[in-house]
Amino acid sequence: MNKAERFFAKTAAYRAVIRDREEGALSHSYLLICQDEAWLRLYVRALAKLIMCEKGGLCGECRPCRLIDKEAFTDCDFYPEDGEKISAEMIDRIVSEKCYVKPLESEKRLFCIVGADKMNVTAQNKLLKTLEEPPANVCIILGSTGDYSLLSTVKSRVKRLEIPLFPSSVIYDELEGRFADKEKLKTVCDLCDGKPGNVEALYADDAASRALDECIRIFSEMKKSPDIARYSGKLVKKSRDEFLAFISAMRLVVRDLVFIKEGVEDGVINKERAFDLETIAERYNEGALLTISSLLGEIAASAENNGNQTMLADRLLFALLEENYRWQKL
Ligand SMILES: [Zn+2]
């Protein structure tokens, strides 16, 4: 199994498809929801292999498994191809021509559309009829990072599978052997928002330590209300993934600060920044830190659901300034 397949194999989605296979009840269409965009295509491939494998699972050895890995199996098409964009014409080509070509060497023909949430309404409507009355032996896999842009008529006709966000410890255990610096990997796993597909980039990019620097700087420098506008401007420029990584880093910093406040130094994750953290901890009341911590949880959830980043950033910065003051007055 490749790296994404090992995570896939841990999910209820994987077990559901194995069950469908064993019962001879594979659906004619699946919607694979996976917030881990970096690995979305890998997960879709894994699902395709699971459906087409000649040995009942992700054997990696049979002809479909080997060829699907390279997206080169004749009975399994992947869209979009390199450099292509998902378009209504592309969907039209699939549903009005390709769907009616008989499989060449297997019992099924599989069509995998990666990034199905990028289909516009015209494209989705074109697909709808095929989802309603699929030609015999055709199976359609829609891979998507979310489902809010999909029509409810599309959603109601596909079997939904979900790749969940994984706990940091599960990601660490699975990837441990692949990275030299275990401490750094541990921090990166905490920062990757449950998406193992983000780990490599975070590790290579040293984004983890930059995110940590940024959090410490904000905590150290936020003193007056004009500071809110200054930092808000920076936070708003981040992409959603960068913003989420920043919020995760912030949560770890606040957790560390609470540990320091409680005198549990062993619990501190960012030990190499202990001096900075202790300096910040002196300025903050523990009650304020706990309030900020629960606010960060809300902000992370809201950011995952495409909440307004400007408002979320302002809420956080305002709380950093005000909560401490509020608690000191109590
Ligand atoms: Zn196989």
Image (cartoon, rainbow, N blue to C red):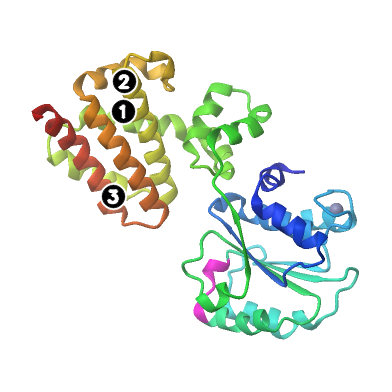
Label 3 sits on residue: 312
- Residue 192: percent from left, percent from top: 50, 39
Residue at point 52%, 68% (across, down)? 118
Residue kind at label 2, given as amino acid type = Leu
Can you name the residue that lies furthest to the front here?
Answer: 23
As drawn, the label of residue 224 is none
- Residue 326: percent from left, percent from top: 12, 34
Q: Which residues are magenta?
A: 116-121
Quarter occupied by residue 112: bottom right
Q: Secondary structure at mark 1?
A: helix
Number of labels in the image equals 3
Which mark is nearer the camera, 2 or 1? 2
Residue kind at label 1, given as amino acid type = Ile
Residue at point 85%, 55% (across, down)? 56
Label 1 sits on residue: 216
Q: Secondary structure at mark 3?
A: helix
Q: In this rendering, is residue 282 above or below 26?
A: above
Residue 17 seen: yes
Label 3 CA crowd tier, 10 Å (few <14, some 14–19, many 20+): many
Quarter occupied by residue 223: top left
Q: Secondary structure at mark 2?
A: helix
- Residue 161: percent from left, percent from top: 62, 60
Residues at marks 2 and 1, CA–CA distance in whole angstroms? 7 Å
Whichever of labels 2 and 1 marks the residue nearer the N terminus, that label is 1
Horizontal side of 12 relative to 120 (left or right) equals right
Quarter occupied by residue 113: bottom right
